[in-house]
Amino acid sequence: MAQIGFVMPGEVSMFLPQELFGKLMWVLMSFTAGYCEEAVFRGYLMTRIRLLGKFNSWTIPVIVSSVLFGIPHLYQGFAGVVVITILGAIFSISYIRYRTIWPAIIAHFFLDFLNLFIPQFESLYEKIMG
């Protein structure tokens, strides 16, 4: 995102635990966040928007639920909201395609879980790319 002018603040790293117990709790939190957020935004909200709005397609429910999913990430800046909104749309499409929220839950879990390792990946990338 920085390449196209959307810089995400570095404050996200302050949420990442440094000690073993915190990292274990992060794994648990990653699963519960993935499960709960997907149940709310895809399993409930998106389907209710479609039913209550009597929409024939999923387009409006996907857009609305994805934007509402992205907005709470304002602490990551505008770029964070854009990225999370796009991820919400991808999770929504997965829900529609597979008719279950489990693929979205699993993907969401891994995205949150892998945040523990991003600093190592960035450091490795810098070493490789010079």
Image: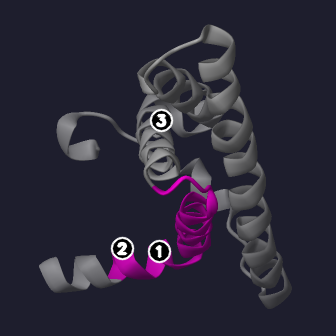
Mark 1 is surrounded, within 10 Å at the Cα level, by few (under 14), some (14 to 19) or many (20 or more) other residues, namely few
Q: Secondary structure at mark 1?
A: helix
The reply to whether dot 3 and dot 2 touch (C-beta < 8 Å) is no
User: What's drawn in magenta, residue-wise?
Assistant: 98-123
The reply to whether dot 1 and dot 3 touch (C-beta < 8 Å) is no
Which residue position is annotated with label 3?
85
Q: Residue at x 53, y 74 (%)?
A: 114
Q: Secondary structure at mark 3?
A: helix
Coordinates of residue 81 in the picture (x, y in percent): 50, 33
Which residue position is annotated with label 2?
122
From the viewer's perspective, is 81 left or right of 129? right
Tell me the amino acid under the disc marked 2.
Glu
Q: Residue at x 50, y 42 (%)?
A: 92
Coordinates of residue 95 in the picture (x, y in percent): 53, 49
From the viewer's perspective, is 122 left or right of 51? left
Q: Earlier in the sequence, mark 3 or mark 2?
A: 3
Q: Residue furthest bottom?
A: 20
Q: Residue at x 74, y 59 (%)?
A: 35
Q: Earlier in the sequence, mark 1 or mark 3?
A: 3
Residues under labels 1 and 3: Cα distance?
Answer: 23 Å
